[in-house]
Image: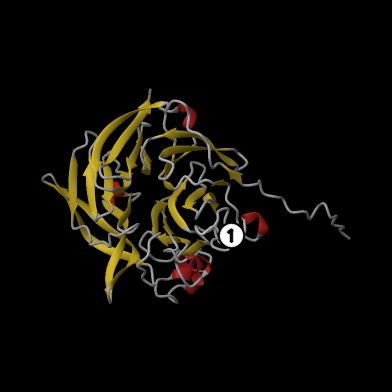
Amino acid sequence: MIVTTALAVQPILASQSINAGGRAAVAENPFKVQEIAAFNTPWAIAFMPDQRLLVTEKAGHMFVVDRTGLKTEISNVPAVSFEGQNGMLDVAVSPDFATDRLVYFTFSEPERSGKDVVSSLTLARAKLGEKGGKASLDDLTVMWRQMPKSKWGQPGGIITFSPDGKYLYLSSGDRMNPKTAQDPKLALGKVLRFNRDGSVPQDNPRADLAGQDADNARALTWTTGHRNPYGLAFAPDGKLWLHEMGPKGGDELNLIKSGLNYGWSVVSNGAQYSGEPIPHHDTRPEFEPPVVYWTPVIAPAGLAFYEGALFKNWKGSALIGGLASMALIRVEFKENGDANEAERYDMENRIRDVAVAKDGSVYVIEDDIPGRLLRLTPK
């Protein structure tokens, strides 16, 4: 007979979440700043294999930008619902771009409903055509639309590909309707996982429900309980990380694992804007807590992992743009999975997105009119 002791069945307790809110910026930034180009309320940046950049503007524009700052506007961009937080959103380059020329992007697709304009978070792809100094989105295909449509903000819309290039992950916000994040029949407040053609992967947690929702919400759901996720990226070790904006406090950095529920709007380490408290994560252990959270908030936007050679102390770090904090945030990771804000760099403007070039330089873009595209290199 095997005797199991009480000690043997004790659960392994996760490390306590770290509050990195209120940290001060470093006295002097370790980089010099070069302005490359300027845009009208830009939203996302993404490198192509030849190290030119794709840049989106929220009003419904997309550009190819070379290293000198030369901008070529891309034609055939679909109409967007441009209001508040909605508009043209993220852009990502196919893992096989060198051969398929495919660009994936998200936007708020408009539709008139009575006196209101409502929108769906929409995922699309198209071939980037370039000829004679001009660029266009050709053979555009809508892959997925979030249902039901909404007139509110917080769309999410961040795209990332798995390290093997087989799967596409998409963050979907709660559209300012908090209860939707816990509704399994809605794709709001979720991380969704697709095959690259937009179909449901057979190993998704509820792939058996494919075809049973208007937007395949349950079949596509990878994780649940997110508020306003504007950062989604794989670390060099293959782990998937997401950050999301909290309400009044409680911005989060989460390690994303299939099938888990991250608690919004049942729990948060922030409070309602009215001041009404929300139960904290430590009161509900069935929900996955953040690894790091920020109270006061940083308003995170954009997420990239650094594997370059220029900033040697940054290797393996996550770089996060800060809107309210007007900063670039660097997060370090330990082998046991713990993380913490390592440094905060004052950028004197709202940082909307961040990307790392092959040469190790870091590019950030400002959320402003004009919003500058900046290249950061060591001093």
Q: Is 163 on the left or on the right of 130, as rendered?
A: right
Q: Is 205 on the left or on the right of 170, as rendered?
A: right
Question: Relative to 349, does residue 186 appear above or below in the rendering?
Answer: below
**In this orientation, which residue lies closer to the viewer: 177 or 304?**
177
**In this orientation, which residue lies closer to the viewer: 231 or 221?**
231
Residue 32 percent location from the top left of the image = 35, 26
Q: Answer whether residue 285 is visible to the viewer in this image.
A: no
Which residue was labeled with disc 1? 278
Q: Could you tell me which residue is drawn at 45 percent across and 60 percent down?
A: 193
Q: Could you tell me which residue is drawn at 60 percent across and 56 percent down?
A: 288
Q: Which residue, as the protein is rendered here, is positioned at the far left?
A: 132
| Residue 355 found in image quarter | top left
Question: Relative to 184, does residue 91 appear above or below in the rendering?
Answer: above
Amino acid bearing label 1: Ile
Q: Could you tell me which residue is drawn at 32 percent across and 54 percent down?
A: 89
Residue 55 percent location from the top left of the image = 27, 46
Residue 365 percent location from the top left of the image = 32, 41
Residue 129 percent location from the top left of the image = 19, 51
